[in-house]
Image: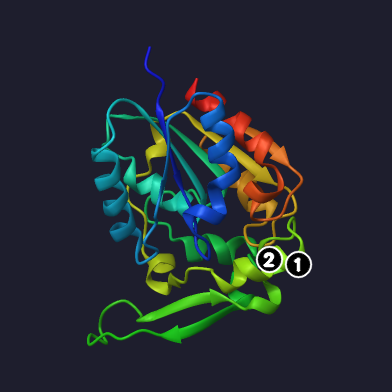
Amino acid sequence: MRKPTIVLVHGAFADATSSWNSIAANLIRRGHTVLAAANPLRGLRHDADYLRSVLDAVEGPIVLVGHSYGGAVITEAATGVESVTGLVYLAAFAPDEGETAAALDEKFGGAAQHITQARPLPGPDPQGPPNIELTIDPAHFHTVFAPDTDPGTAAVLAATQRPLALAAMLEPAGSPAWKFLPSHYALATRDQMIPIEGQRFMAARMNATTIEVPTGHAAMLGAPEALSELIAGAAA
């Protein structure tokens, strides 16, 4: 039986390389085919449509893995895609239909609203989505986003972070794929961006198979072996 391709989807304030290098290496050593997608971070529907275009080029079954905002993207993108056989969430948003990532963030007291910096984007339509993108203040990146790294590594991650369009956080989700696909969830118990109470709530309502890792938000950097094991199990 053909093993699924594992497609890794990073979240906001990150990129495919910094997020997935260790986990991708672990999974490849186990014999898995891995693809780390470049999440545009421009809008939930836009990003999900882009991810679907990536999935369309993959032959055979797929397991989707999302971190942080990437969880919202895989939730949206997998709906109606028959090749996707499972979902894995790593300290990630998993919205229900009509929910926004911003509303979940506010509900559970995520730190993003306190440590992000906003800057205007060019855009002629004042009636459309807010033309603003967000980055994490580098002064807070280590302590809040990537506490499981050393200060030097965190400084590089802060300097190379990819901004998130505010519109992506405000766009309501469509029908969630976790309602009909087997789901796994890694709970990061020291996460300040998506506090553990919020992660538990989302994992419970999707009836996900869960593990806990004693990490901050960038759990892939703090517990790559445990998360690789979870992903490999979902792909088995």
Q: Secondary structure at mark 2?
A: helix
Above or below for 117 versus 32: below
Above or below for 221 versus 203: below
> At which x and y percent is residue 4?
40, 25
Residue matched to label 2: 154
**Kind of residue at disc 1:** Pro
> At which x and y percent is residue 101?
47, 61
- Quadrant in the picture for residue 62: top left
Residue 207 showing in the rendered view: no
User: 234 left or right of 172?
Assistant: right
Q: Residue furthest top?
A: 1
**CB atoms at circles 2 and 1 under 8 Å apart?**
yes
Which residue sits at x=66%, y=63%?
A: 145
Q: Secondary structure at mark 1?
A: helix
User: 142 left or right of 113?
Assistant: right
Q: Answer few, some or many: residues within 10 Å of disc 1's Cα (few below 14, many 20 plus, some between 14 and 19).
A: some
Which residue sits at x=35%, y=48%?
A: 76
Quadrant in which the N terminus appears: top left
Residue matched to label 1: 151
Q: For the residues marked 2 and 1, what is the alpha-carbon distance in whole angstroms?
A: 5 Å
**Kind of residue at disc 2:** Ala
> At which x and y percent is residue 46?
29, 60
Above or below for 127 versus 51: below
Q: Nearer the viewer, residue 93 or 229?
A: 229
Which residue sits at x=60%, y=34%?
A: 228
Residue 138 showing in the rendered view: yes
User: 214 left or right of 16?
Assistant: right
> Which label sits on residue 9?
none
